[in-house]
Amino acid sequence: MPDANRPAHDTTRFPAHVDAALSQAGWQPGRWNMHQAEQWADTLRAHTSPAGHRHTVFPAAVEAWAEFGGLHLHTTAPGRQIAPTPLHLDPLTGLHHARTLTDLGRALDTDIAPLGTEGDHRALLTIDTHGRVYSLDHSGDWYLGPTLDRALATLLTGTQPTRLSPA
């Protein structure tokens, strides 16, 4: 449900086929479901791993969940450098990855929260306190962009992400 306190988005926010994928998934400018985002935040805050790891929740994550949470995105457009990847934006897909996110956050000197999955659960999408987006998979950790908008464009246009340097 749109929030009157959120600024309206302009139609040039995303590349055309990214915008089409978002529309097909049910997103529209002004989409804002804070109630659902707060439920996800409460679930993540309440979860403790068997080893005692906990999730951190912060405004950049909650805002991303409010606007894009629950969407299943895919495109049939060809990729620029690699194949575009389908996405499912649901932070609870990262519920059992608190330690992994804590470790990545420590390496990057920031807090990390889950965003969803990429490629039918082959990679975990995450966001940091500054709104930067990362993907974690079996081959490494990847920087997708300085904002969720840029990360969506990277993934849905098939732009090669930047691999994070090993520590």
Image (cartoon, rainbow, N blue to C red):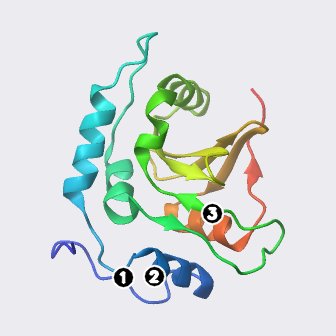
Q: How many marks overall?
A: 3
Where does label 3 land, which residue?
86
Report the amino acid beneath label 2: Ser
Q: Which mark is residue 9?
A: 1
- Badge 3 crowding class, 10 Å Cα cut-off, few under 14, some 14 to 19, many 20 or more, is some
Assign a secondary structure to mark 1: loop
Which numbered disc flags the more N-terminal residue, 1 or 2? Answer: 1
Which is more foreground, mark 1 or mark 3? 3
Q: Position of residue 51 (x, y in %)?
A: 46, 9
Which numbered disc flags the more N-terminal residue, 2 or 3? Answer: 2
Is residue 53 or residue 90 the one in the foreground?
Answer: 90
Q: Residue at point 28% right, 41% down?
A: 41
Q: Position of residue 147 (x, y in %)?
A: 52, 61
Where does label 2 land, which residue?
23
Assign a secondary structure to mark 2: helix
- Is mark 2 in CB contact (under 8 Å) with mark 3? no
Q: Residue at point 63% right, 47% down?
A: 135
Report the amino acid beneath label 1: His
Q: Residue at point 80% right, 75% down?
A: 80
Quarter containing the C terminus: top right
| Vertical arrangement, residue 145 with respect to residue 73, above or below | above
Q: Residue furthest front?
A: 120
